[in-house]
Amino acid sequence: MAACRSSFCCGSGPLNEDNARFLLLALFIVLYLLCGAAVFSALEQPKEREAKARWAQRFELFSQRFNLSENDLNDFLRNYEEANGAGIRVDTVRPRWDFAGAFYFVGTVVSTIGFGMTTPATIGGKIFLMFYGLLGCAATILFFNLFLERVITVIAVALKSCHERRHNNAALPPNGQRPSGGGAGKGQDLAGWKPSVYCVMLILGAAAVLVSCCASLMYSAAEDWDYLDSLYFCFVAFSTIGFGDMVSSQRVVYEGHATAAYRLGNFVFIVTGVCCIYSLFNVISIVIKQVLNWLLGRLEAPCLCCLPSRGHHTHRRNVVAPGHLRARRHPSIEMDAINDSETDAGRRMSGEMISMRDFLAANKVNLAIMQKQLSEMAIGHPRQSGSRQNGFSGGVGALGIMNNRLAETSVDR
């Protein structure tokens, strides 16, 4: 038992820190799925049984009234389901495959929302969708990543401005006059300041809620939905879940509303909402990883005595750190390349976030990291956790960008 525990802590065995975090997250997801299934089954199953009983009663009454056999009526309903899949509805809806309808469809494809109310029926359409979605989804994900970078940059600028204002107010003496030589002290006091990841998450959450509430007002007025149903649609659409049970902008004409203006507003809200929720999900994923690191630290606590070489770092970052101010306790390929890309003195206003040049450099570094990991795994020598920085230097894509810009949890936070 002791040997197994030591292998877990030191990362010398098969269950190193990376694998332990992966298994812990997998266990959490499985438990989360089981709890969610239990809750939804308890909430929705009685409603399903009632609807099934009502439908059976209506089916029997209809067949008796019009003297139709069950087989004939079932065949008719199957034909209607086939027509429904092709876009034929009982109520009048706008054409699905005119240019406007097709544009709405490709928007749901590249954004990965995929409502499902419109799907290609021809072989040519299905084949074209495979190639079209491959490039379109990749380009849209890149757009979301660039949006994420710029949103966090704006948040960092705003937080730094507020911090400077509070610092200046606190530094003023009672007579209200600034002491001579205060500029140097101000620079020293603000040199190590970094905005907290939790502040970033809170601001992104507030932005997502604000966009969803405003969009829900528009949808409830235009689509005659309840406000809660509109909020539900906003979350399903903005998170790209896209069930398709509720889809906006499907009528031919909206009475009392400017149809063109409403469709433009629908497009703007969906794009803005998806960007906000995508950014929020990435920040939340960082916080989840921090919690996993904390749990792993608690599990490793009894074995720290056998790891004198790793040291005991009681002060760890929990902030968005400027690249030139990061402490490089454990240099590695990941942090070396990224820190080298951040030495531009005038790369941005705030000095905290990555520029476009650094964004591209980070993507190259992420690719190099992935190639390095693949080669190490192929030859049977996985990278050791000792070469990493607080367990957060890895990651590819948006998660890699966030990991290298949002600092990790500190023990004494």
Image (cartoon, rainbow, N blue to C red):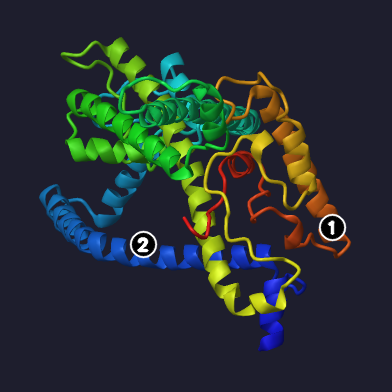
Q: Is residue 116 visible?
A: no
Q: Residue at x 39, y 40 (%)?
A: 82
Name the spot of residue 300 as percent of width and height, x first.
Answer: 60, 73
Q: Quadrant of the N terminus?
A: bottom right
Please determine whether, in this image, residue 129 is positioned above or below residue 12: above
Please determine whether, in this image, residue 269 is positioned above or below residue 235: above
Quote the CA–CA distance across marks 2 and 1.
38 Å
Q: Is residue 319 visible?
A: yes
Work out whether residue 277 or residue 347 is closer to the camera in this orientation and state it: 347
Read off the residue under disc 2: 36
Q: Residue at x 73, y 36 (%)?
A: 339
**Residue 275 as seen in the image, left or right of residue 149:** left
Work out whether residue 186 or residue 1 is closer to the camera in this orientation and state it: 186
Amino acid at circle 1: Glu
Numbered badge on residue 376: 1
Q: Residue at x 70, y 79 (%)?
A: 6
Badge 2 density bin: few <14, some 14–19, many ≥20, Cα 10 Å: few
Amino acid at circle 2: Gly
Badge 1 density bin: few <14, some 14–19, many ≥20, Cα 10 Å: few
Q: Secondary structure at mark 2?
A: helix
Q: Give the quadrant of residue 399.
A: top right
Q: Nearer the viewer, mark 2 or mark 1?
A: 1
Name the spot of residue 96 as percent of width and height, x first.
Answer: 40, 24
Name the spot of residue 126 as percent of width and height, x first.
Answer: 58, 33
**Residue 191 as seen in the image, left or right of residue 169:** right
Please determine whether, in this image, residue 205 is positioned above or below residue 311: above
Q: Secondary structure at mark 1?
A: helix
Q: Give the quadrant of residue 137.
A: top right
Name the spot of residue 230 as percent of width and height, x first.
Answer: 24, 35
**Residue 232 as seen in the image, left or right of residue 308:** left
Numbered badge on residue 241: none
**Residue 75 as seen in the image, left or right of residue 277:** left
